[in-house]
Image: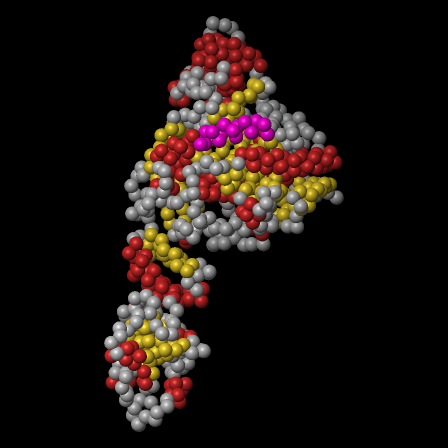
């Protein structure tokens, strides 16, 4: 029988089980949440350490199976393939809070696989996967410092915080923040909001931490009941003798190199701290142990000790001397310059440069059909705004193969996307799909936040009416004993050697996106509060720099951007625009050079390469969907003759009957004596009967003209060539000689007996 613990979180029951499934893994846990969510997580460690590496080989995967939502994958391939973007981001959310909690020197491969077995389409399972990972590690024999859990926080319409809100709830509340932590500290924060204050954010984190403590307590109880005894794994620690020798003999070189302000020059100076240079110092002394360790190319201790010395020197500089490697003060931002409309062909572009970090961003406008369609286990709507982040190797002066975007690139792109979404115009106001690409041209830290700034420039340059400028800054933390220093706008060295990377993006009015990663066993709310105060000051300063470059959206879209027109028609009229087999809409698209998308609610989106083509398509759609009203006059085309009158197309798909008695002011003996097929005549709608049949009169128009009055034109400009000349055939439900349906006049069997005056033989009746 499995062991389990349960508690209530966010108004739903959370049950954590172990001992029944995946028992060959080092540790496994099954977490049930609410009525539908079930996540299984297995934690496995390799038997031996991986040789020749100087990093911790942790791999986290979040497996979304379509069966969990009762779905079959769309498209030709029916087997799940590479992870979705949501799956990649969820895997990162598992990795980031647990990675710092493994022992230093751990080199055994650790694999964490969280599989969603069942899901609620309206409730994200990602935070449940973090809890499952924490439980699996807790009951395993893998050494792990502190148990961890996570929750998502939203707000209701009254501003009250909600634990693990549904998709609808956190969309309505304007905030969704994922927080992971242990019983005594916060390990990770990530989320977005519609311009919330720093205080609201901190309250949300504190609220989340209280919920996390409850889950961690339950995991502790489960570990006591069913946890395995922790195994002894070999830890690859640096050799104490070599460490002592290097700190004594290379300290001056490290101190000097760390104070070189330029990144490339500093890297060159640090690069001189080579094994060869160390051996040259060692030549005068006979130390065989140290010599053997330095000369062994497979031994990574030399490089690890150099990095540790750099970390220690950074702590001394920043915490004690208040000096940063590039000479800045702790709260100082690197020099900034910006440009817009950098290249001519793209719809909007911008370059944002901050110190040695530079990002080029391009914005492209598309039609509604260009939005990204998502096929996953969550009921997430299609994406109208997409942001992608690219990090080529030359941006850091390296050479490596160009491959598909990695998890880091996907995560940074999502963060920048989240930052801009709250300020985008509504679809009704700006009916375009937006795709933004950030190319990192140079990188020395904070490139994701530079992408946020570059996105603001590119969108404004493209004429997108965003509500406010958005800027971002990355904050850092350096700890030395009980003392610490918070750094603004961290560069690469401060990111890699420091303890925190805290990215904050937003407008003048508040935060729109946030992400915090740390390398220690948690930080306090007070440290976060100090960092947020400095981040706000910096954000406001950067926004002013952006405004100096471009204050508001371009008044005119790029000449290369599509022109979009939106119409609202009755859903009943959609079939008129599409036509049989798509014949009508395809003709409009071909004739006008446009792209047309029609929603089920009757919204018609017309995108054209030029305004003239879009306007022509608009007129054609309006003519197809125009409602015929009694009393209006139209220029129509005679489509066919009957012995009792003529059928006239007055609008595409709209036909009516001009009875023989209504063809002329005088008596008409035969219809063909007055009109013939193809003639264009002015007619007036005199009646639309209960069956929707349209009765027309030519006599009423001729009589008005004879009386000196000009015939009135109803609605838009008349359709000069009838429905067929505009590519729209008569309605399919119209049958010659029949009732005519909603769009045409009746046949002879219905109309003939209504004649009041007898006609001579051969009169056409």
In the figure, is residue 227 to the left or right of 369? right
Q: Is residue 218 above or below residue 715?
A: above
Taking the image as drawn, is residue 489 in sight? Answer: yes
- Residue 140 visible in this rendered orientation of the protein: no
Q: Which residue is located at x 72 percent, y 35 percent? A: 221
Q: Position of residue 133 (x, y in %)?
A: 62, 37
Q: Which quarter of the image is occupied by the N terminus? A: top right
Q: Nearer the viewer, residue 82 or 629?
A: 629
- Residue 228 shown in magenta: no
State the residue in front, 588 or 511.
Answer: 511
In the image, is 271 to the left or to the right of 634?
right
Tell me which residue sits at (47%, 39%) in the image: 419
Q: Quadrant of the C terminus?
A: bottom left
On whether residue 535 falls in the magenta region, the answer is: yes
Q: Where residue 764 appears, x then y in whole percent?
A: 31, 89
Q: Image height check: is 182 above or below 121?
A: above
Q: How many marks on residues?
A: 0
Residue 452: give x, y in percent of width and height: 43, 36
Looking at the picture, how far across and down is residue 304, in whole percent? 52, 20
Please report the residue visible at 31 percent of the width from the left and 76 percent of the height from the top: 683
Q: Is residue 692 left or right of residue 228?
A: left
Magenta span main SS: helix
Q: Quadrant of residue 733?
A: bottom left
Q: State the image quarter where residue 201 is shown.
A: top right
In magenta, the rendered stretch is 525-540
């Amino acid at each position: 029988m499995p062991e389990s613990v349960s508690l209530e979180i966010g108004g739903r029951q959370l049950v954590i089980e172990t001992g029944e499934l995946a028992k060959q893994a080092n540790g496994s846990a099954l977490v049930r949440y609410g009525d539908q969510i079930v996540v299984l997580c297995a934690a496995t460690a390799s038997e031996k350490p991986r040789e020749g590496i100087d990093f911790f080989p942790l791999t986290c995967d979040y497996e979304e199976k379509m069966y969990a939502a009762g779905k079959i994958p769309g498209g030709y391939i029916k087997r799940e393939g590479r992870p979705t973007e949501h799956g990649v981001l969820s895997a990162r959310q598992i990795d980031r809070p647990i990675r710092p909690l493994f022992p230093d020197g751990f080199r055994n491969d650790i694999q964490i696989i969280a599989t969603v077995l069942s899901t609620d389409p309206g409730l994200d399972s990602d935070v449940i996967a973090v809890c499952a990972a924490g439980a699996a590690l807790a009951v395993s024999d893998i050494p792990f410092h502190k148990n961890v859990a996570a929750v998502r926080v939203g707000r209701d319409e009254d501003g009250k915080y909600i634990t693990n809100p549904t998709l609808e709830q956190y969309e309505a509340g304007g905030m969704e923040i994922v927080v992971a932590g242990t019983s005594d500290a916060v390990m990770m924060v990530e989320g977005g909001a519609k311009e919330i204050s720093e205080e609201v954010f901190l309250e949300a984190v504190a609220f989340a931490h209280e919920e996390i403590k409850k889950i961690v307590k339950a995991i502790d109880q489960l570990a006591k009941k069913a946890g395995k005894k922790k195994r002894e794994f070999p830890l690859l620690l640096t050799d104490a003798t070599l460490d002592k020798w290097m700190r004594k003999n290379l300290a001056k070189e490290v101190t000097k190199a760390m104070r070189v302000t330029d990144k490339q020059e500093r890297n060159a100076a640090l690069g001189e701290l080579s094994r060869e240079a160390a051996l040259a110092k060692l030549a005068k002394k006979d130390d065989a142990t140290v010599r053997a360790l330095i000369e062994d190319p497979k031994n990574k201790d030399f490089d690890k000790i150099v990095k540790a010395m750099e970390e220690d020197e950074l702590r001394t500089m920043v915490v004690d001397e208040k000096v940063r490697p590039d000479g800045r003060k702790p709260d100082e931002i690197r020099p900034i310059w910006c440009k817009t409309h950098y290249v001519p062909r793209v719809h909007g572009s911008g370059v944002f440069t901050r110190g040695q970090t530079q990002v080029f961003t391009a914005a492209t406008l598309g039609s509604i059909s260009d939005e990204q369609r998502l096929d996953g286990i969550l009921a997430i709507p299609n994406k109208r705004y997409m942001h992608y982040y690219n990090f080529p190797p030359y941006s850091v002066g390296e050479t490596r193969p160009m491959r598909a975007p990695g998890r880091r690139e996907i995560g940074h792109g999502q963060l920048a996307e989240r930052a801009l979404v709250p300020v985008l115009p509504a679809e009704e106001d700006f009916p375009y799909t937006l795709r933004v690409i950030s190319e990192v041209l140079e990188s020395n830290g904070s490139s994701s936040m530079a992408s946020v700034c570059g996105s603001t420039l590119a969108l404004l340059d493209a004429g997108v009416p965003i509500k406010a400028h958005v800027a971002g800054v990355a904050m850092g933390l350096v700890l030395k004993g009980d003392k610490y220093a918070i750094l603004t706008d961290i560069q690469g060295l401060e990111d890699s050697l420091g303890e925190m990377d805290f990215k904050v993006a937003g407008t003048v009015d508040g935060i729109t996106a946030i992400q915090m990663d740390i390398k220690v066993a948690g930080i306090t709310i007070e440290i976060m509060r100090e960092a947020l105060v400095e981040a706000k000051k910096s954000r406001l300063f950067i926004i002013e720099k952006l405004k100096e470059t471009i204050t508001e959206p371009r008044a005119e879209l790029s000449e290369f951007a599509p022109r979009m027109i939106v119409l609202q028609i009755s859903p009943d009229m959609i079939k008129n625009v599409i036509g049989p087999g798509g014949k009508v809409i395809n003709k409009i698209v071909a004739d006008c050079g446009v792209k047309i998308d029609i929603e089920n609610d009757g919204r018609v989106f017309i995108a054209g390469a030029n305004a003239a083509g879009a306007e022509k398509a608009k007129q054609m759609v309006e003519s197809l969907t125009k409602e015929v009203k009694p009393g209006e006059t139209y220029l129509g085309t005679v489509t066919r003759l009957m012995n009792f009158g003529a059928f006239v197309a007055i609008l595409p798909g709209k036909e009516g009957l001009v009875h023989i008695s209504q063809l002329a002011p005088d008596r008409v003996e035969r219809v063909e004596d007055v009109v013939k097929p193809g003639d264009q005549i002015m007619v007036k709608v005199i009646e639309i009967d209960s069956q929707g049949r349209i009765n027309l009169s030519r006599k009423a128009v001729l009589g008005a003209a004879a009386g000196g009055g000009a015939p009135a034109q109803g609605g838009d400009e008349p359709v000069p060539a009838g429905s067929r000349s505009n590519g729209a055939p008569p309605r399919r439900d119209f049958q010659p000689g029949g009732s005519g349906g909603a769009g045409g006049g009746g046949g002879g069997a219905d109309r003939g007996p209504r004649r009041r005056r007898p006609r001579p033989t051969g009169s056409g009746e």
